[in-house]
Image: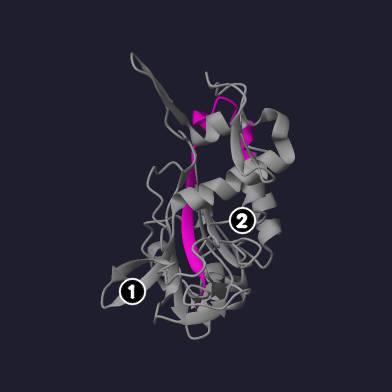
Amino acid sequence: MTKHIFATIVTPTAVAANNRGEGDGSTLSTLQKITRGNDQYTTVSADAIRWAYREYLQSIKAEEVNRTFDAETDEYNIKNEQYNAKTYIDDDLFGYMDAKKNATTKRRGVLEVSRAISLDPFWGDITFGSTGGQKDKTSIHNTEVHCTAYQYTLALTASSLKDPRRAQLILDAIPAIQHVGGNHARFLYEFRPESIVIRISDDPSPWIMNCFERVGDSVGCARLVRLVEVKDILANELIVAGEIADTPYGEKLKGLNVKVFRGIKEAIASVKQATLVG
């Protein structure tokens, strides 16, 4: 059977301000938002997260990455516009589409990434600042900020890659990605996991998306516990790690024979040993 790797990541709680530093001197709604129930939540696009994974791959395997970014010139460069999933890691993992007049060459990305959603509702917090220099009506600006954690899900089928060993690079990248969305010099926000759930299964559906929720000042995963209890997810398919391990939810999952680790990197090492991606 084909093995699929799914991971739902919840970040640490911090102040997010995912604008790109553009538009100084204006009043902008800089955080993307969605409505769920009666509340608004902030969100970060899957494209922004994918970009951070591309950046990680460029930092460790620049010679094997087709599309690279030059921060000095603020430009993207493509080594080979013919694209080649066998040669280039990013063409294999993220796919491509080259639309020509008479033909379109494309490959669906093997790595799938969901949009990140905040755990906490957004209540409209705004900070004000000045651009400096001459003071006039355009020198004062505001920025929306949100103190929250985000969660998002990855899906990957290693056997669908031209080189299945490349799945290991994505597992290594999970705790190492940096510049997601507006995470730039002006606003630092960690997108590494504070807690993580990884599922290795023959099931093509993740079942673990949005499994984290805010519980007081911490995070819980009651829906995940229930899915294991009713055997919609088998306990031996799961690896759970991070701060969730030190909560009652972590204890419940241990009691259900789920592998629970306190350390994120230890858990990822365990996943690499349990699959054919090491």
Judge whether 16 appears above or below 87 on screen.
Answer: below
Q: Nearer the viewer, residue 199 or 190?
A: 190
Question: Which quarter of the rendered picture does the C terminus lie within?
Answer: top right
Quadrant of the image occupied by residue 168: top right
* Residue depicted at 71% across the width and 43% down the height: 59
Dot label at residue 241: none
Q: Nearer the viewer, residue 184 or 164?
A: 184
Q: Which residues are magenta?
A: 147-168
- On the image, the x and y values in percent for residue 114 come to 43, 52
The secondary element bearing badge 2 is classed as: loop
Residue that lies at the very extreme toward the top in this rendered image: 102
Q: Nearer the viewer, residue 211 or 116?
A: 116
Magenta segment includes 203: no
Please give the residue where the numbered disc 1 appears in the rendered image.
Answer: 40
- On the image, the x and y values in percent for residue 60 come to 73, 40
The secondary element bearing badge 1 is classed as: strand
Asked whether the viewer can see residue 275, the reply is no
Magenta segment includes 167: yes
Asked whether the viewer can see residue 266, the reply is yes
User: Which residue type does callout 1 highlight?
Assistant: Gln
- On the image, the x and y values in percent for residue 44 come to 45, 60
Please give the residue where the numbered disc 2 appears in the rendered image.
Answer: 179
Judge whether 173 appears above or below 60 on screen.
Answer: below
Q: Quote the CA–CA distance across marks 2 and 1.
A: 24 Å
Mark 2 / mark 1, whichever is N-terminal: 1
Quadrant of the image occupied by residue 232: bottom left
User: Which residue type does callout 2 highlight?
Assistant: His
